[in-house]
């Protein structure tokens, strides 16, 4: 698809279908939304209507959810009535269970390079930071990292790199993706590589698509243009419009699954919240499919970065409410939480709509190979990791809390991306498809990588969860495949 763009307009008017950042993320519309939310934050009649609209409705085939507009969701976020908050949390959990069940998808970040030419004020990789070592993985070092990640049990990675056209050109990223997919160590392989690199051209997005990436992830950092320009004083990332319009170029380049995010702590959270929902509405309006995922990172301490130097930090309570309100607004969008958050916060938000979490993460370049699960290098770390447990511990903790850790990557490998994935959600086929896939990939993890204690808990959970598969034939096949995984080296079964 080729999209036509007009020149930047002088007076931006809100238009979700526009391809110009100032029109689809429109400052005036956000300000009016925030005033509207303030005016109505105690209007119980309106709030109850919004809550009713958000609730999942049972139909013949599964559930249907209508989601909320950025204005409606902003009213809920602004309200501080305790009973309203309780209802928001309850509905968020209902939506999570209706669409994602009790499954949580697992992934790990893999840092390729911390060379960066940008001047982002919140990131230790900024160009002016002269005392951190700069490191870029060679293909041999990358192999070692991937083998270490496979030996932990990971199947899905998010690759990360600073922006540097000389040190990290697109050819380097493509070569790395190729290397990652080519490594099959013991029973391991990486089956989905998501990519978090700087905004780029349609042509480069097409190359990433052809290399077989999963989701293209790019955090907006902040939707507030004035703050954005100050926080990114130098380097290519300074261009707010180019950055904000990146997802349209990615989709034009053939990438169906894109992942949004803001870095909470940089600007006012209510502004960011309205902005990210407007971005989702824009993608739906232009491309017919919203974001595949939304990430909710919070600013963390890192080398020369002190979060206290920023004025907009948010409490755990506000953070949890943001997660729940996003769940109500975009019910079909996966939500990701990283190890920036500690165990306690992660435990809470898993019930409020989070569907993907990282585990055993290292945020430094070369952080996996050669280190025990307890050791971690700090010299090239992008931010402090709050949840420092091993993947085995995270997997066991999830199961002890009733969640099924899933290493599934089937959808995109079966071509169920973009709106085809949404269709699966909407027709209630998830229990016949995602659930057995989650259980089969969990069995692979237990058999190949888990500690004896995790293995015991895991197989007990699998036995119980298999009974939830509605279609008898599917249940039988899943049981047989799991028996094969336990008794042989046969792997990678999927529906
Ligand atoms: N260079 C790419 C870009 O510009 O989008 C990749 C991004 S970077 C490797 C991944 C993300 O980490 C950034 O988008 C930013 O939101 C986040 N990040 C940077 N500094 C951080 C900090 N101090 N605390 C938490 N997250 C941070």
Image: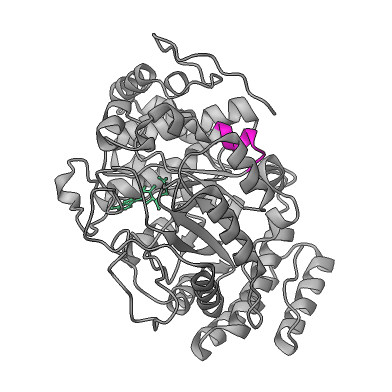
Residue 479 in which image quadrant: bottom right
Q: Residue at x 49, y 72 (%)?
A: 141
Rendering coords of residue 206 (x, y %): 65, 41
Residue sitting nearer the eye, 23 or 357:
23
Segment colored magenta: 248-256
Q: Is residue 48 visible?
A: no
The residue closer to the viewer here, 470 or 149, is 149
Residue placed at 45% from the left, 44% from the top? 198
Above or below: residue 65 compared with residue 381:
above
Image quarter where the C terminus lies is: bottom right
Residue 293 magenta-highlighted = no
Q: Residue at x 79, y 79 (%)?
A: 480
Answer with the quarter of the image where residue 12 lies.
Answer: top left
Q: Residue furthest right?
A: 473
* Residue 345 horizontal/vertical position (percent): 33, 60
Q: Looking at the image, how many numbered discs can be counted on the residues?
A: 0
Residue 172 lies left or right of residue 116; in this view the side is right
Residue occupying the point 68% across, 60% down:
434
The image quadrant that residue 373 belongs to is: bottom left
Instruction: Determine if residue 363 is in view.
Output: yes
Name the outermost residue toward the top: 11
List x then y, in percent, for residue 267: 26, 36
């Amino acid at each position: 698809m080729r999209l036509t763009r007009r020149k930047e307009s002088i007076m931006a008017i809100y238009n979700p279908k526009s391809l110009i950042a100032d029109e689809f993320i429109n400052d005036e519309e956000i300000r009016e939304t925030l005033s509207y939310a303030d005016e109505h934050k105690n209007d119980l009649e309106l709030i109850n209507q919004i809550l009713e609209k958000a609730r999942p409705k049972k139909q013949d085939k599964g559930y249907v959810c209508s989601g909320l507009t950025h204005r409606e969701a902003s009213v809920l976020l602004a309200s501080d009535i305790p009973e309203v908050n309780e209802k928001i949390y309850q509905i968020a959990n209902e939506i999570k269970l209706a669409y994602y069940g009790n499954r949580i998808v697992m992934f790990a970040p893999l840092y390729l390079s911390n060379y960066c030419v940008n001047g982002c004020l919140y990131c230790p990789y900024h160009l002016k930071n002269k005392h951190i070592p700069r490191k870029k993985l060679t293909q041999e070092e990358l192999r070692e990292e991937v083998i270490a990640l496979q030996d932990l049990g990971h199947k899905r990675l998010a690759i990360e790199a600073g922006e540097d056209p000389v040190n990290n050109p697109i050819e380097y990223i493509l070569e790395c993706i190729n290397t990652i997919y080519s490594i099959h160590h013991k029973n391991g392989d990486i089956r989905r590589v998501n990519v978090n690199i700087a905004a780029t051209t349609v042509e480069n997005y097409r190359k990433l698509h052809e290399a077989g990436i999963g989701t293209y992830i790019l955090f907006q950092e902040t939707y507030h243009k004035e703050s954005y320009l100050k926080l990114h004083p130098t380097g290519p990332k300074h261009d707010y419009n180019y950055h904000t319009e990146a997802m349209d170029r990615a989709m034009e380049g053939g990438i169906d699954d894109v992942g949004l995010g803001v870095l909470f702590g940089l600007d006012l959270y209510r502004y960011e919240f309205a902005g990210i929902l407007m971005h989702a509405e824009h993608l739906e309006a232009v491309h017919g499919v919203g974001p595949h995922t939304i990430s909710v990172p919070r600013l963390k301490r890192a080398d020369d970065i002190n979060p206290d130097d920023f004025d907009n930090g948010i409490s755990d309570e506000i953070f949890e409410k943001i997660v729940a309100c996003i769940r109500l607004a975009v019910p079909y969008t996966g939500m990701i939480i990283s190890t920036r958050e500690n165990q306690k916060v992660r435990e809470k938000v898993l019930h409020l709509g989070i569907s993907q979490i990282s585990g055993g993460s290292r945020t430094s370049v070369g952080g996996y190979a050669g280190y025990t699960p307890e050791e971690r290098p700090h010299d090239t770390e992008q931010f402090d990791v709050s949840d420092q447990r091993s993947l085995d511990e995270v997997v066991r903790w999830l199961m002890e809390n009733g969640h099924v850790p899933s290493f599934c990557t089937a959808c995109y490998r079966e071509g169920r991306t973009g709106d085809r994935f949404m269709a699966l959600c909407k027709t209630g086929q998830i229990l016949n498809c995602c659930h057995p896939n989650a259980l089969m990939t969990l069995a692979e993890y237990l058999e190949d990588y888990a500690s004896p204690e995790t293995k015991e808990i895991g197989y007990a959970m699998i036995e119980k969860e298999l009974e939830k598969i509605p279609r008898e034939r599917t249940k039988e096949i899943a049981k047989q495949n799991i028996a094969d995984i336990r008794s042989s080296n046969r792997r990678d079964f999927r529906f």
